[in-house]
Image (spheres, rainbow, N blue to C red):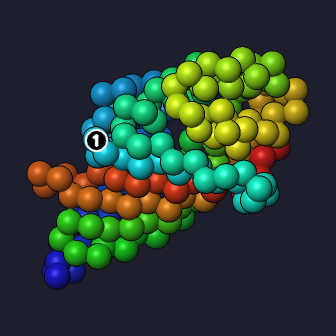
Amino acid sequence: MPTDLERLIAIEDCKQARYNFHRSLDTKDRDLYLSTVSADLVFIPKDANNPDLGEIVMNGADTFWGFAEQVLLSRKSIHLGVAPQITVIDENNATGFWYICGYGELTEAEAAEKAAEAKEIDEHAKQALEIFAADAGGSKKSLAFESIEDEYVRIDGKWVISRILVTALASL
């Protein structure tokens, strides 16, 4: 088991991975993004208000980035992660829980256009887009609230995100 100091350092490193992940999306910085995730990243979006949507799983860092390019990166966005709860399991594994407040600009027409483009990237991307853009309501500006459950791994001494379960909670 890690010492108290090693545990605290791991917690801070996991937080930095999440913060930099958000910044990479907002600045459209692929290199920064790749420095925050494992190559075999698993991304699972869910909608707490629409349990009828089937499970969506995107496998691989490149798959998520391709989805993000189609859906998120073409628009202005701001991702704020708050109230992190990081649990260090052992020297190389940790979990985290976050609340996310995200701002984005997307109209219904743009959402439909992006849905068509996203379908070409991943068979589940269209469904994932429905989760993130369902409440756009014709507005170019939206505010979304999500919870995120992360899994972190330490690879070559660096903590990165290996699994993300994001649950859409509400949007305005």
Please give the name of the residue rendered at 41% of the width and 43% of the height, measured from the top-left corner. Answer: 59
Q: Observer-nearest residue: 49 or 7?
A: 49
Displayed quadrant of residue 167:
bottom right
| Picture coordinates of residue 20, whole percent (x, y) | 38, 42
Q: Quadrant of the C terminus?
A: top right
Q: Observer-nearest residue: 151 or 58?
A: 58
Left or right: residue 38 versus residue 125 is: left
Q: Observer-nearest residue: 166 or 3?
A: 166
Tell me if residue 123 comes above or below residue 90 in the rendering.
above
Tell me if residue 94 comes above or below residue 54 in the rendering.
below
Q: Observer-nearest residue: 2 or 63?
A: 63
Residue 103 visible in image: no
Tell me if residue 20 comes above or below residue 162 in the rendering.
above
Tell me if residue 88 comes above or below residue 81 in the rendering.
below
Q: Which residue is mark 1?
A: 39
Q: Residue furthest left?
A: 156
